Image (spheres, helix red, strand yellow):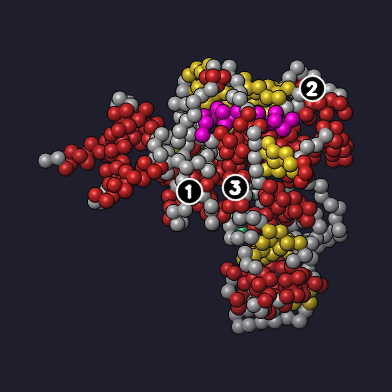
Amino acid sequence: MTTLPIDDETRSRQSRNRNGINIITDLRFPDMQDLVDRLYFNPKEGLIWLGDKRMMLMHVEAFGALRQELLESNGVEFTRGLLTRVGYMTGQRDADLAIKARGTGNELDIAAAGGQLHALSGIVEVAPVCIEFDHAKGFKYGEFTWKRSVESDVHIAANGVSTDPICWMEVGYSSGFMSRLMGRRLLARETQCQGCGHDLCRVIVKPVEDWDNIEEDLKYFQPRVTDHRRAQPVKPVKNTPVKAAPSPFGLEESQPLVTELGRPVGSSAAYHITMHKILRVAGTNATVLLLGESGVGKTMFAHELHSNSLRANTPFIEINCAAIPEQLIESELFGVQRGAYSGATDPRPGRFEIAHGGTIFLDEIATLSMTAQGKLLRVLQSGDLERLGSNKTIKVDVRVIAATNEDLAMAVKAGRFRSDLFYRLNVFPITIAPLRERKDDLPLLLDTVMHKLCALHGRHLAGVTPRALQVILDYHWPGNIREFENVIERAIILSDEGDMLDIRHLSGLDALGGQLERIGTVSWDSAPAIGIRMPHVETPSVGLAQQDNASHEQLLAVAQRALQRGPVRLSQIEEVYIEVAMQQSENNISRAATLLGLSRAQLDYRLKKMSSDNSSVTP
Ligand SMILES: Nc1ncnc2c1ncn2[C@@H]1O[C@H](COP(=O)(O)OP(=O)(O)OP(=O)(O)O)[C@@H](O)[C@H]1O
């Protein structure tokens, strides 16, 4: 892609290079007229737009009153969490606008748009202090000062000087903006704050893994910890469960955040809406119906619901109705009396009895036989069941969570599902959006899944290359999070110890229809790309992304001409690129490897292979 000329102000920055870390100081933001030009007022129709997003003007006093009421009625933790997440979401939206507005400029200008849009929205005046990036790993450190933050002003006006930093929404904004821009989890922290009486606020942004005690900050990005206020028990569960299984995802607030890896994560609006619904219904005894495509996380959310319920310390019994043969499903769910059929030599409790006092999760509910549907309806209505072959009624107290990826209303119409059961189950439906509609979750998911799977496979990876990130963020993930986990797991296994996870490791995506969109990276002047994602920019395709000056059309033309002349060996193309990279880097293997997006060891291996292949064909 083309790089716009750097304006005078940006050029005035000082750049030092130390141990592969580029430190840029004396930064000044570029002219922001391009951003101002995207602010439209249409007072006649009551509309304000910033880019393609509708905005609103709000009195700072009104915001202050709202914030104060939240603080007084819900406490600091709740208010901080809420404002952090509102800020995070706004930052993500502004990052999209920054990419659209400055997509053809250099990366520093795109990043600067965050501070400028924050100021344009009247929230805070931002000044950059220092930015560092690592040649191998990308963005490493950013330091900014803030003046006149809206939150410090309203906080001081209402409460006086605070002992702790209080620009929660602004911190959320910076974290959201930078995470969206870099395609990985970055976190902003206020190290000094005007709300505490300092001259100005000072903010540091770093990758999540480079901060200590990160759990303290991260909990505000998830609604569950701060928003969770359990309802009082509707009625105490009296009976001891038949077989108590410890809940794998218990959510006592005193529990360490280590459980984070086994619990849902996300930062998209759709994710937050789902979590809010889960938490709202968790404290009741209502039956819940989880809807959504395969692999979106229905099972995981069912666990989350149980863990947040009054039954958290009671059994959570999970049953996949589709995995059990039709003739066995009734005995499995409701139990068997001795002699109910030949072979039933012992009486056996069903899953409902085992779940007594706890929760049963019926996955793939649409596959239940009509008889089983009838029995399930009875349990839901009266809590009564009879084991197969028995007349004795057993009373159970079980909360039911059901899930399906089918349209149950259609199944009712087709006569495959009882309408009375459908209405009974549909008391509180929660639809979980597919991953393609909540791409904001991807950086957080990638981070979580990488940590989990690297630990599982004993691999230590240096990170993810910008171009691989771009593919991950732009792919439409038809198999949702399950597919995402599989692709990342395969990629981790294919990577060598110490590698950066790269496009060549993402093999599963090609197999799924080759739906990769065009990708590309932009350069930070002549330094390696720091990973800003450019989803809508027409740039060279996979494997050619490093050649930021070649247009896609030019490369297509070369490929077309070559193939018209006859068959082409892909390995030959690879060799040609390696040769050119070696020439351009004057045979410096490390520099050539950087040009090709490879590690030094990988290029070294290829060079040796090329030379042994060539010597074996030379007479
Ligand atoms: N929000 C999330 N955060 C982290 N991991 C997730 C999230 N949602 C789902 N996963 C992971 O994705 C995988 C698929 O999730 P899950 O089995 O819950 O999907 P599902 O909708 O129940 O699928 P199916 O309909 O096929 O039963 C699991 O490994 C789960 O751990």
Q: Callout 3 environment at 10 Å: few (<14), some (14 to 19), or many (20+)?
A: many
Check disc 3 and report the residue beneath it: 439
Image-quadrant location for residue 154: top right
Check disc 1 and report the residue beneath it: 517
Q: CA distance from mark 2 to mark 1?
A: 47 Å
Which mark is in front, 2 or 3? 3
Q: Callout 1 environment at 10 Å: few (<14), some (14 to 19), or many (20+)?
A: some
Q: Are marks 2 and 3 in contact (CB under 8 Å)?
A: no
Q: Quadrant of the C terminus?
A: top left
Can residue 214 be seen here? The reply is no
Q: Regarding mark 3 in the picture, which secondary structure is present there?
A: helix
Residue 560 painted magenta:
no
Residue closer to the observer: 578 or 364: 578
Residue 113 painted magenta:
yes
Image quarter where ligand 1 lies = bottom right
The mark that comes first in sequence, 3 or 1, is 3
